[in-house]
Image (spheres, rainbow, N blue to C red):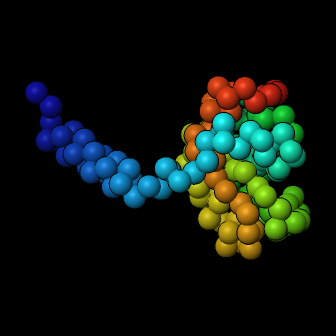
Amino acid sequence: MSSPLLQYGLITFAVIAFFVWKSGVFSDRPTAAAVKAQYEQGTVFVDVRSRGEWQAGHLRGAVHLPLDQISANAARVLPDRDQPIVIYCQSGSRSVSAEHILQKLGYTQAVAMRGGIGSLARAGYPLVK
């Protein structure tokens, strides 16, 4: 028999998950397969994961700009605010936050990719350590 607190937590999680799913927050994001041609044409891919995650493996040619450093370093690392930018992280959550921050900073073509580094690996992108 589970405790009332556990039951409440599970119900809360289910309700939040339902509303996130219904809102389409992640469904309108491009997949790794959908942006492969952009990668091959030289579009800037930005990895917003932590240093440790980056060092464990990242997309060849990606720019490392951890989420907590975007506001302070975006202008230096990404000087062209009109260039196409694809953002990825571990699972897709931080990349959505990074997209919003970059848009507020004036980046006109920044888009968060659905999924994360695992999606890139499964789609056959070159990963390096």
Question: For the point 73% across and 63% down, which residue is it?
Answer: 109
At which x and y percent is residue 52?
72, 35
Asked where in the image residue 103 lies, by quadrant, the reply is: bottom right
Question: For the point 34% across and 48% down, which residue is it?
Answer: 17
**In the image, 21: left or right of 29?**
left
Vertical position of residue 96 compared to residue 114: above or below: below
Question: For the point 87% across and 66% down, which residue is it?
Answer: 80
At which x and y percent is residue 59?
78, 35
On the rendered image, what quadrant is the N terminus found in? top left
Question: Which residue is more in the foreground, 54 or 41?
Answer: 41
On the rendered image, what quadrant is the C terminus found in? top right
Q: Residue reaching furthest left? A: 1
Q: In the rendered image, is residue 84 in sight?
A: yes
Vertical position of residue 25 compared to residue 4: above or below: below
At which x and y percent is residue 14?
27, 45
**In the image, 70: left or right of 24?**
right
Question: For the point 84% across and 34% down, which residue is it?
Answer: 60
Q: In the rendered image, is residue 94 in sight?
A: no
**In the image, 73: left or right of 53?**
right
Question: Which residue is more in the foreground, 69 or 119?
Answer: 119
How many discs mark residues in the rendered view?
0
**In the image, 126: left or right of 67?**
right
At which x and y percent is residue 40?
84, 39
Vertical position of residue 75 compared to residue 93: above or below: below
Vertical position of residue 12 compared to residue 59: above or below: below
Asked where in the image residue 77 lies, by quadrant, the reply is: bottom right
